[in-house]
Amino acid sequence: EDLFHDGLKDVYYAERKILAALKKMAKGAESDQLTAAFEKHRDETEAQIERLQQVFEIFGKRAQGKTCPAIDGIIEEGQEILEEFKEAPALDAGLVAAAQ
Ligand SMILES: [Fe+2]
């Protein structure tokens, strides 16, 4: 039960970080198609966060995140691409790779 709770907090933290990152990536993408793809993923992520809140409720615990260094690292790399390839032709390719 403790391990499940720990994992739930990890995923909850990660999904919320991903939501914020997807908003930035949607704004940063050059192509309209890629922006639309990030916005679709953003909407899906919002639904996942709500679902996780339901899981916390069923589990009888407060919805609470726990820092996940793995997602922080992945998001940091995406942020680096946004900054380093701003206005470069490879920006969208870099964003796709970072998101994957
Ligand atoms: Fe984690």
Image (cartoon, helix red, strand yellow):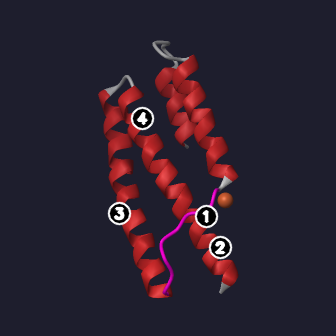
Residue type of the residue flagged with mark 2: Asp
List the residue tagged with mark 2: 6
Kindly report the distance in space between the C-alpha atoms of the residues bearing marks 1 and 4: 22 Å
Range covered by the magenta-colored residues: 60-67
Labelled disc at residue 10? 1
Which residue: 62% across, 50% down?
71
Q: Do the residues labelled 1 and 2 touch (CB within 8 Å)?
A: yes
Q: Residues within 10 Å of mark 3 (few under 14, many from 20)?
A: few
What percent of the width, then of the height, locates residue 64?
52, 68
Q: Residues within 10 Å of mark 4 (few under 14, many from 20)?
A: some
| 40 versus 57 height, above or below | above
**Image quarter for ligand 1:** bottom right
| 5 versus 70 height, above or below | below
Labelled disc at residue 24? 4
Q: Is the CB of mark 4 within 8 Å of ligand 1? A: no
Residue type of the residue flagged with mark 1: Asp
Q: Do the residues labelled 1 and 4 touch (CB within 8 Å)?
A: no
List the residue tagged with mark 3: 47
| 80 versus 3 height, above or below | above
Q: In the image shown, does 29 or 70 lie closer to the viewer?
A: 70
Position of residue 50 in the picture relative to residue 4 (left or right): left
What percent of the width, then of the height, locates residue 1?
65, 87
**Lower sequence index among marks 3 and 1:** 1
Which residue: 37% across, 49% down?
42
Q: What element carries label 2?
A: helix
Q: Is mark 4 on a helix, strand or loop?
A: helix
Kindly report the distance in space between the C-alpha atoms of the residues bearing marks 4 and 2: 28 Å
Q: Is mark 3 on a helix, strand or loop?
A: helix
